[in-house]
């Protein structure tokens, strides 16, 4: 089976969030199952700087206002094939995959990711002049959303999968861009790419893809609701009713192992947690926190409204008053950064904050923490709660999305339903009670650290999905359990 995995991020070379980790983990897990999967990625400046050998394999012509480009082939150290969309005027810039150094989105992001989508469609349709053509095209989030549409408009019948990592980001642009992006006028319609009189890349992917997946079963249900469907709940509800919506939980990289993580100054295992306390001492010293025998609450997060950092700020005083300390690391919205900076200054001995992202320090905070705070307003999947459990840091999380799917309340962490300071504080008080009972704390830590969140389970489900789309049978021994009908069945039951 051959799969083209089109993405705007790949952790090996360019990452802005969780999509980069998914794009690095899932294709490799599929490879281990014998799938010939190749990644398609824009050739950003940071990608070119990190790739040693690049070979141009073909040139693609432009369309409408979309520039021509070259497709280059590179390989990661472990042999994953990566096709790079090379067009310097679009991708050779300082900044993140989506924004300039000052944090503002590039004004031509529509062209930049239309180019990625068009390249994916041309390779998938066998029109790129390459000696490799996929059986399935798998695109991710709005940057790849036009690819299924371009295939349909070309009359190509290559099966397509769109994975939604966060439905709140939709890739919107003005309707005047229809011609520039090579979109047929007839497609600017409610049954097409139109969304409130604008073009929506994500809606295009939803409407034209053969199958839609999200990164957890609970989030798949949530995006069919008005509250969390970001205005697209009518369409996602129809897709679910047709049996074309899946929820498949992400995995985490196998390097998240506290017994061998090279970023940790002290290693530890479930039956010997002395190294965990030693890591806590290192983190407290690094953040200038006072010595404490109380619990350490960790926060490793993008500092944005979605993550509920304001709710943490509302409860921080009570956490400190009851003997806890908080170690925070993240980067994001300036207002959120300033709010947390003020909070840390007002509790210098007990709340530490590092603005920015540093992989070694992120892992050390998770390893050092007794509990991990995640009061997200919504969370499609989340990786931190899985990483935390592997490191014996029991997550305290809002019961939503992937958090609800990956945390066993009272066994490997604590879930709360009331999204408020009181709701979070109630869960924290449960955690304080467990911390004071050494036997229960040890039991929960061991249960959390024993959980497996490897990519193998997700890869098995995706392989089965791909096989169903192309009409190929998967041997029963390797087939994943069928969870993809759950959304449709629940909607029918609710009706």
Image (tube, rainbow, N blue to C red):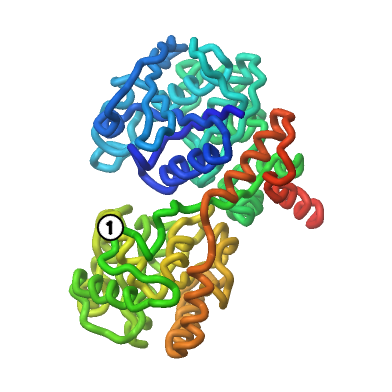
Based on the displayed image, in which of its 4 quarters is residue 51 positioned?
Answer: top left
Front residue (pair 444, 265): 265
Q: Residue at x 81, y 56 (%)?
A: 493
**Number of dots carrying numbers:** 1
Question: In the image, 477: left or right of 140?
Answer: right
Q: Quadrant of the N terminus?
A: top right
Q: Which residue is mark 1?
A: 360
Vertical arrangement, residue 349 with respect to residue 388, above or below: below
Front residue (pair 421, 286): 286
Q: How dense is the environment of label 1, judged by Cα within 10 Å: few (below 14), some, or many (20 and up)?
A: few
Q: Residue 451, position in %: x, y?
A: 53, 65
Q: Quadrant of the C terminus?
A: bottom right
Q: Residue at x 53, y 60 (%)?
A: 452
Vertical arrangement, residue 421 with respect to residue 221, above or below: below
Q: Residue at x 63, y 20 (%)?
A: 152
Q: Residue at x 32, y 74 (%)?
A: 275
Q: Residue 175, position in %: x, y?
A: 50, 25
Residue at disc 1, secondary structure: helix
Residue 198 shows up from this direction = no
Residue 119 shows up from this direction = yes
Front residue (pair 451, 128): 451
């Amino acid at each position: 089976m051959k799969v083209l995995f089109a993405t705007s991020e790949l952790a090996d070379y360019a990452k802005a969030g969780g999509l980069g980790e998914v794009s690095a983990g899932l294709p490799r897990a599929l490879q281990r199952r014998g799938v010939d999967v190749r990644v398609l990625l824009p050739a950003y400046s940071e990608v070119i700087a990190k790739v040693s050998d690049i070979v141009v394999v073909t040139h693609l012509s432009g369309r409408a206002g979309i520039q021509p480009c070259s497709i280059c082939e590179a390989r990661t150290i472990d042999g994953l094939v990566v096709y790079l969309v090379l067009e310097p005027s679009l991708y050779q810039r300082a900044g993140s995959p989506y924004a300039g150094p000052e944090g503002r989105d590039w004004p031509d992001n529509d062209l930049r990711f239309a180019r990625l989508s068009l390249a994916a469609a041309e390779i998938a349709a066998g029109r790129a002049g390459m000696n490799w053509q996929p059986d399935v095209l798998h695109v991710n989030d709005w940057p790849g959303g036009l690819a299924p549409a371009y295939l349909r408009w070309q009359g190509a019948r290559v099966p397509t999968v769109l994975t939604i990592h966060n439905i709140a980001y939709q890739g919107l642009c003005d309707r005047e861009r229809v011609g520039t992006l090579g979109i047929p006028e007839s497609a600017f319609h409610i049954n097409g790419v139109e969304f409130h009189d604008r073009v929506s890349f994500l809606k295009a992917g939803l409407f034209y893809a053969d199958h839609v997946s999200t990164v957890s079963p609970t989030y798949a249900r949530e995006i069919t609701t008005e509250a969390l469907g970001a205005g697209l709940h009518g369409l996602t509800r129809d897709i679910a009713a047709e049996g074309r919506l899946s929820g498949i939980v992400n995995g985490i990289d196998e390097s998240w192992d506290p017994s061998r993580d090279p970023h940790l100054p002290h290693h530890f295992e479930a039956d010997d947690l002395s190294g965990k306390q030693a890591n806590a001492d290192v983190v407290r010293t690094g953040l200038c926190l006072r010595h404490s025998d109380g619990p350490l609450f960790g926060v490793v997060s993008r500092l944005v409204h979605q993550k509920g950092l304001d709710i943490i700020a509302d409860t921080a005083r009570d956490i400190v008053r009851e003997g806890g300390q908080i170690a925070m690391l993240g980067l994001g919205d300036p207002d959120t950064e300033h709010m947390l900076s003020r909070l840390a200054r007002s509790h210098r001995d007990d709340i530490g904050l590092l603005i920015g992202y540093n992989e070694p320090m992120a892992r050390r905070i998770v390893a050092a923490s007794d509990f991990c705070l995640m009061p997200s307003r919504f969370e499609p999947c989340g990786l931190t709660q899985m990483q935390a459990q592997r490191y014996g840091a029991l997550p305290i999380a809002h019961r939503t999305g992937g958090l609800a799917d990956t945390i066993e309340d009272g066994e490997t962490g604590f879930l709360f339903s009331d999204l408020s300071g009181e709701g979070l504080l109630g869960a924290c008080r449960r955690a304080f009670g467990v911390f004071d009972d050494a036997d229960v704390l040890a039991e929960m830590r061991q249960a959390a650290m024993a959980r497996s969140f490897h990519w193998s389970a997700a890869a098995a489900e995706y392989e089965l999905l791909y096989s169903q789309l192309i009409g190929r049978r998967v041997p029963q021994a390797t087939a994943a359990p069928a969870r993809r009908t759950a959304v449709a069945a629940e909607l029918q039951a609710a009706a």
